[in-house]
Image (cartoon, rainbow, N blue to C red):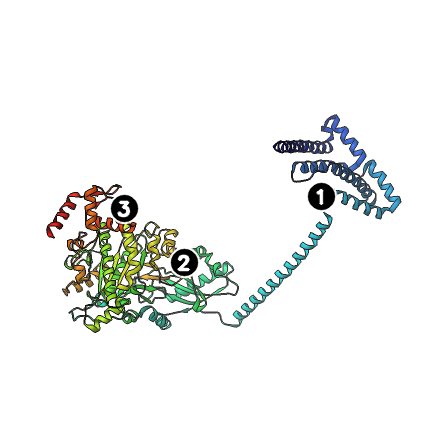
Amino acid sequence: MGKNKKTKSKKQDNIRINREATSLFFALASFLSAYAFIVPYKSGIVGRAFSTVVSEIFGTASYILPFIFLWFFIIHFRQSVEIRKRIDFIWSTLCMVSSSALFESVHFIFKSKVCGGWVGDKLYMFFNELLDVRLGFAVISIIALICTTKLLRISIIRVVYNFFKNLKRDIAKSKEKAKIQNEANIIQQRFEQDLSRQEPIKPNIVNKQEREERKKEDIAAHAVDKQETFGSKNFNYKLPNAALLKNDSASSSLTSRDELLKRAELLRTTLADFDINAEVKDIIPGPVVTRYDLVLAPGIRIQTVSSIIDNISLAMRTASIRVVTIPEKAVVGIEVPNPSSVIVGLRGILESRAFENSRSLLTLALGKTTDGLGYVTNLAAMPHLLIAGATGSGKSVGIHTMILSILHKARPDEVKFMLIDPKRVEMPIYKDIPHLYNPCTNAADADIITNPREAAAALKKLVMVMEERYTKFAKAAMRNIEDYNSKMLEMGGEKEFYIVVIIDELADLMLIVQKEIEDSIQRLAQMARAVGIHLILATQRPSVNVITGIIKANFPARLSFQTTSKIDSRVILDILGAESLMGKGDMLFLPPGEVKPVRLQGAFVSLKEAEKIITFITDQNFPRLYEPMVVEVEGKGGFDANRERGSKDLIPALKLINERRRISQDLLKANFGGSARATNILSILEIEGFVSKPEGANKWHIDFDKISQYLNNLESGK
């Protein structure tokens, strides 16, 4: 069987080689015959003789011979075409003969110069005597057509069928296109008639009073979060007054009415240049950008407007333009930066009805919307906030406004701040406020956390605080901090305070202690809401290495200032847009559960204004008070001997290290069981200073002297 297969394969190779050789022969024959017919005087004796003989026999039909040779080259070269040598030879000969007769008929009927040679002359005389001139011409034409189609392997029936099928389809398409065009013309005529009947739409410049009336319900929705502010002990503490801040300079627009109307007309004509018929319905001037609400003509898509943003920016002589949809008004809003912007002050938002009516202790005054209204939200409902923005975009100022907003609402016994500032330059002004909190120290020693490893230890201790609160709430059969504080108010017990953790530069912490920071943030973000712990994380580098998937999944509320690239915008907001912001407080805020972000102009607070608020608070000498459980956690990143004495795993782990003179996760896993348990023990050992891993090293450094001293003290204390 193998021999037969080999023989068959060899036979197929021979057939392929023969076909290739034959195809080359016909290619050469096609070229030489064509050359001999076109320039016989340069083709030599053989070429002239060949041209003369063939022309005498077939006449003008001899020029078909090179094309027949070319066709034979094609069918031999293409392996997929079946070769029929005898049949192809017969049809090619009949094609030459019938063509000669056809050319001879044309010569006599139409008085043409073409002739059919000896073959054509004889056949023409035969058909002329048999069928007459006209009928003979028709029969010869049909015979020539049949021979040609047979030689080229073409089905006349299929060609005719496809022709009529395509013709029918083209007619149907043209009718449908004409119908659609007719309907579009009717709609356009109606639109133009409506415009001609009515007076041209005059843009309505919405003033501040009208905007406030239109947005009362929205303000209430943003501002009033049903979170009770329970009473506390009667401390002699006064909340700071907004009068300590400067007056809001953004109350009046710097752009005149005539300038707004002129820019609206420029916008309309620019769109008209791109065949976009639209009218400006409303002009809503804001502190930094002005929104022009457009009514588009029927049939014009919003994507058409978005595709020419760069052209609109060029015509309006501005850097960045944003197109937004406004479903409640059935218009398209185009946000155009003002020629000269004004500063949005924090005082105007703090004195607004929205902020005053909010009962939440964690009310944040973020800024003003594009239509000039104050935007207030509740951190407790988020429950955590992720902030990103390039250097100089207003990120740090935004964090200051959030802190000051809460300071205007909450007493030190109601809200505590755990401030982590690796840059060491943004948060020092808050180091003396009674709201400051650090779970690793006593109340009197609480300070701004600047060391990354100290920050990692503080977050781990905060996880312990969270677990302790859950245990306390479970014993009281309460689900969250609001219910627990309500019950304590009725029973006269000690209430719990809210803890707001603010990290001003997350990237620096992730660079040094990523594993510890990420684990603690993940646990706090997943569980800390119910016990009153909320996180605000800020970074100027929103890359996937800093804002990891674990962190991002637990932060539904996002706030982005101007970013340096589209990739950063997609990382922080999951959409594009932040790269087109103007900087200096221009932001996109994505509330939890919303699809599209809200554009805001962040409130500005100068350092002197913030110092006035802080001085007002510190002058009251309000005491820093912690819960007893937190006071027991002593030392900056150190350990509490009384707490560790009760640990089940620490002492056996220290004895194991002292005995084996080494430490690894595999060793702990083999002796204590479970990767999670081994990781937890290793983390405790590192926090307490028994082991350490220098930067750039893979081996653990063990402080055997400290372990021996700790075990000796423990034995002597028993």
Of marks 1 and 2, the one in the foreground: 1
Marks 3 and 1 sit apart, C-alpha to C-alpha, by 80 Å
Q: Name the residue under label 1.
A: 153
Q: Mark 2 points at which residue?
A: 321
Instruction: Please report whichever mark, 3 or 2, sits nearer to the chain's N-terminal start.
Output: 2
Marks 1 and 2 sit apart, C-alpha to C-alpha, by 62 Å
Marks 3 and 2 sit apart, C-alpha to C-alpha, by 61 Å
Of marks 3 and 2, the one in the foreground: 3
Estimate the x, y position of residue 384 in percent, counting from the top left. Answer: 30, 60
Instruction: Please report whichever mark, 3 or 1, sits nearer to the chain's N-terminal start.
Output: 1
Crowd tier of the residue under label 1, counting other residues whose Cα lies within 10 Å: few below 14, some 14–19, many 20 or above:
few
Q: What element carries label 3?
A: helix
- The amino acid at mark 3 is Ala
- The amino acid at mark 1 is Arg
Q: Is mark 2 on a helix, strand or loop?
A: loop
Q: Relative to 164, does residue 282 appear above or below in the rendering?
A: below
